[in-house]
Image (cartoon, grey):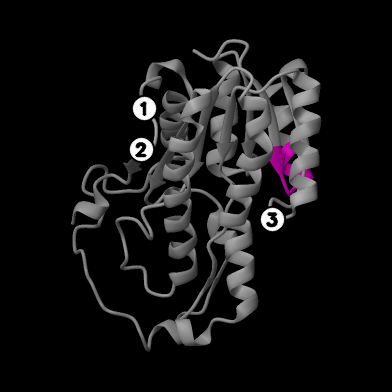
Amino acid sequence: MLKDKVAIITGAGSGIGKSTAKLFLSEGANVGLIDIDKESLQQLKDEVDADEKVRYRTADVGDASMVKRAIDELVESFGRLDIVIINAGINGRVAPIENLEEEDWHKTMETNFKSTFLTLKYCIPYLKKQGGSVVITSSINGNREFGNIGMSLYASSKAAQLAFGKMAALELSTYHIRVNVICPGYVKTNIQENTDSEHHLLNKVRIPVEYPEGNQPLENDGAEAEDVGELILFLASDRSKHITGTEVYIDGGSTLL
C-alpha cells in the first residue's frame, strides 16, 4: 500500500506513533521518526530491524529550529517526502481553569498545537514537489466531547488542530496535498504519563455522570494503538485519495452516549 513512500511521524517513540510506524514499515514505506525521547526511538528502530528504511531525529516539537532541522535532515536522508503524520501531544495539566497557570497554557499549546503548525510548515516545501497526505492526530475532546472536566487546555488545543487542518486542506489542495484529522477517544497508550491531574481540585467542579455498563458501546473498552494506526494507514494511502479536510472519529461510539 505504501511501497517506497517516505513518511515522517512525530511522537513516534510510543503509543499511536509507534504503532503507525510499524504498520507503515510492514507496508513497505520508509519512515522518519521524530520524538523528544531518543531512547524510545532507538528501541523502536531495534525492534523493527529495518536499518535502511528507518531514520530518526530527536526534537522538542514546540521548538521551531529543532523541528525544521529534524525534518530537513530526514528528507535529505530519504530523498523525498510523501506522508506526514502529526501525532506528538500531551494531556498536560488537568485542573480547574482558575487553578491553571500561564505556563500550563504555553506547555500544552506549544506541544499540541504549535507543533502541528511547525511540522506542517516545514514539510510543505517537500510535499509540494509531488503531492502527498497529512494526517493530524486530534481528539474527541474539544470537538465532540466536552465532559472531561479539567481538560480545558487540552480540549482547546485539539479543537485548534481540527480547524487548522481544515484550513490547510483547502489551501494545500492546489498542490495535491491532502490533510485529514483523526479524533480518537480513549486509547490504551502511555499518554497518562504526561498528565498532571489534580483530583483534589477537580472535585469542586466535577459534574457526576455515571455509565453503569461502561462508556464504550462498541467494545466496552478503549482502542488499541494499532486500531488507530490502521485508520492513519488508510488516510495516508491512495485508497483515500479523494478524502481531504475531513475529521474521522475513532472512539467506539463513546461520544454517541
Mark 1 surroundings: few (<14), some (14-19) or many (≥20) residues within 10 A: some
Residue range corresponding to the magenta coloring: 34-42
Give the residue at x 31% y 60%.
145
Q: Dividing the picture into quarters, in which one does residue 70 lie?
A: top right
**Quarter of the picture holding the C terminus:** bottom left
Residue where numbered disc 3 is placed: 62
* Residue type highlighted by circle 1: Ile
- Residue at (49, 23) in percent of width and height: 176
Decide which of 111, 208 is in the foreground and name it: 111
Q: What residue is pinned by disc 1?
A: 243
In this rendering, the answer to whether 202 lies above or below 83 is below
Expressed as whole percent of the image width and height from the top left, the position of residue 182 reads 41, 41
Verify whether residue 214 appears in magenta: no
Front residue of 115 and 56: 115
**Is any atom of residue 124 visible in this view?**
yes
Circle 3: is it few (<14), some (14-19), or many (20+) Cα within 10 Å?
A: many
Secondary structure category for the residue under label 2: loop
Alpha carbon distance from label 3 to label 2: 25 Å
Instruction: Indicate the amino acid at tag 2.
Output: Thr
Q: Secondary structure at mark 3?
A: loop
Proximity of marks 2 and 1: CB atoms separated by less than 8 Å: yes
Say if the magenta span includes residue 37.
Answer: yes
Residue at image mark 2: 246
Q: Residue 42: tell me if it is visible.
A: no
Looking at the image, residue 176 sits to the left or right of residue 56; the answer is: left
Cβ atoms at labels 1 and 3 below 8 Å apart: no
